């Protein structure tokens, strides 16, 4: 109901006058220029070449804003009508700064391309919904301007980020992804998948009780996740090592540790002991192969070596748990 009330307070585009449409375009150009400058600030330290691209795009937006203001001044005077995107129903929206702060380089590039495409499509569609010839001409000009922005984006990209620079930035972005998320997550997955095998299967074969085994597995998995998460977060602040935010690393490590243990714990919700145990063993084998795949994919470890290390190690822990449980 709240959404309906909020939506009903907005103006329809068809109800806007030509003066309001021009004011809306000015505000939109201002917003997009600020967004591009925010992207430039975010990227300047790690990706200086891409930061220059977004600074150039902001300059282009500012040039169009000045042109629109001049047109507005000639036709409607000095006072620009206050109307923004959020005042118009169906108008394309932009995310606030705090929702864009942690975007990757590729995501930022995609967002910028989407911004230009959204603006272009909106103005083209808007031009078909008005009957006034002058307004339609204005919207068509704005659509062409937005299409020109996309072409300028490509030109600026070619100027500031040639293929070799893009390749370097992509490598740096991938390295940061590995250091901040993949490496801590992989360490957590290995710990959760391997270290919990012994207590879970020991409890399973010692008690022959699926519910008690499930409780042991849950406590071991959640406890290991909390422990590993705090350990990773406290390891270093990432400033010297370049490994990124300790909170992100801690969350990646803690969550993956818990998931690694929960994978072969959840089957013990099945009442039948042997069915649950068979499912748990199958899932444990799948987890170990998944670890080997991640090591090969992101850590460049030869797959056979990774598989041998993980599967043999996990098999030994699994066997130890079964032997202890049967003892």
Image (spheres, rainbow, N blue to C red):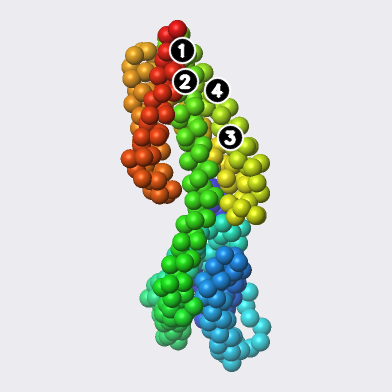
User: Quick check: marks 2 and 1 in contact, CB under 8 Å?
Assistant: yes
The disc placed on residue 228 is 3
According to the picture, the residue beneath numbered tag 1 turns out to be 324
Label 2 or label 4, whichever lies nearer to me, is 2
Image spot of residue 79 (x, y percent): 66, 83
- Between residue 120 and residue 216, name the one nearer to us: 216
What is the CA distance from the residue labelled 4 to the residue labelled 1?
19 Å
Category of crowding for the residue at label 4, using alpha-carbon neighbours closer than 10 angstroms: few (below 14), some (14–19), many (at least 20): some
Q: Is residue 267 above or below residue 142?
A: above
Category of crowding for the residue at label 1, using alpha-carbon neighbours closer than 10 angstroms: few (below 14), some (14–19), many (at least 20): some
According to the picture, the residue beneath numbered tag 2 turns out to be 198
Dot 3: what SS? helix
Q: Earlier in the sequence, mark 3 or mark 1?
A: 3
Q: Is residue 13 above or below residue 9?
A: below
Image spot of residue 122 (x, y percent): 43, 71
What is the CA distance from the residue labelled 2 to the residue labelled 4?
13 Å
Q: Residue at x 53, y 82 (%)?
A: 60
What is the CA distance from the residue labelled 3 to the residue labelled 1?
25 Å
According to the picture, the residue beneath numbered tag 4 turns out to be 219
User: Quick check: marks 2 and 3 in contact, CB under 8 Å?
Assistant: no
Q: Residue at x 58, y 51 (%)?
A: 243
The quadrant of the image that shows the C terminus is: top left
Q: Residue at x 58, y 27 (%)?
A: 223
What is the CA distance from the residue labelled 2 to the residue labelled 3?
18 Å
Q: Is residue 223 above or below residue 61?
A: above
């Amino acid at each position: 109901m709240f959404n309906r009330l909020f939506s009903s307070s907005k103006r329809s585009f068809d109800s806007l006058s030509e003066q309001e449409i021009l004011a809306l375009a000015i505000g939109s150009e201002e917003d997009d220029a600020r967004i591009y400058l925010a992207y430039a600030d975010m990227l300047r330290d790690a990706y200086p070449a891409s930061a220059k691209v977004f600074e150039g795009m902001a300059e282009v937006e500012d040039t169009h804003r000045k042109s629109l203001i001049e047109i507005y001044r000639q036709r409607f005077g000095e006072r620009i009508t206050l109307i923004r995107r959020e005042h118009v129903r169906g108008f394309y929206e932009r995310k606030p700064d705090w929702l864009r702060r942690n975007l990757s380089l590729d995501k930022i590039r995609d967002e910028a391309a989407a911004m230009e495409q959204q603006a272009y499509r909106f103005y083209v569609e808007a031009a078909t919904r008005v009957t006034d010839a002058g307004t339609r001409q204005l919207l068509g000009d704005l659509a062409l301007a937005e299409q020109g922005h996309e072409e300028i984006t490509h030109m600026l990209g070619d100027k500031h980020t040639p293929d070799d620079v893009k390749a370097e930035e992509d490598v740096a972005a991938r390295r940061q992804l590995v250091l901040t998320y993949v490496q801590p997550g992989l360490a957590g997955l290995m710990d959760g998948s391997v270290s919990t095998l012994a207590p879970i299967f020991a409890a399973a074969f010692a008690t022959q009780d699926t519910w008690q085994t499930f409780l042991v597995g849950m406590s071991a998995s959640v406890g290991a996740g909390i422990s590993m998460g705090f350990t990773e977060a406290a390891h270093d602040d990432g400033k010297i090592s370049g490994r990124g935010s300790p909170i992100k690393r801690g969350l990646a490590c803690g969550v993956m540790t818990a998931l690694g243990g929960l994978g072969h714990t959840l089957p013990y919700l099945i009442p039948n002991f042997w069915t649950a145990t068979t499912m748990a063993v199958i899932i444990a084998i799948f987890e170990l192969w998944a670890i080997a795949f991640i090591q090969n994919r992101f850590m460049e470890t030869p797959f056979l070596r990774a598989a041998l290390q993980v599967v043999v190690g996990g098999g030994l822990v699994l066997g130890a748990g079964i032997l202890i449980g049967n003892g």
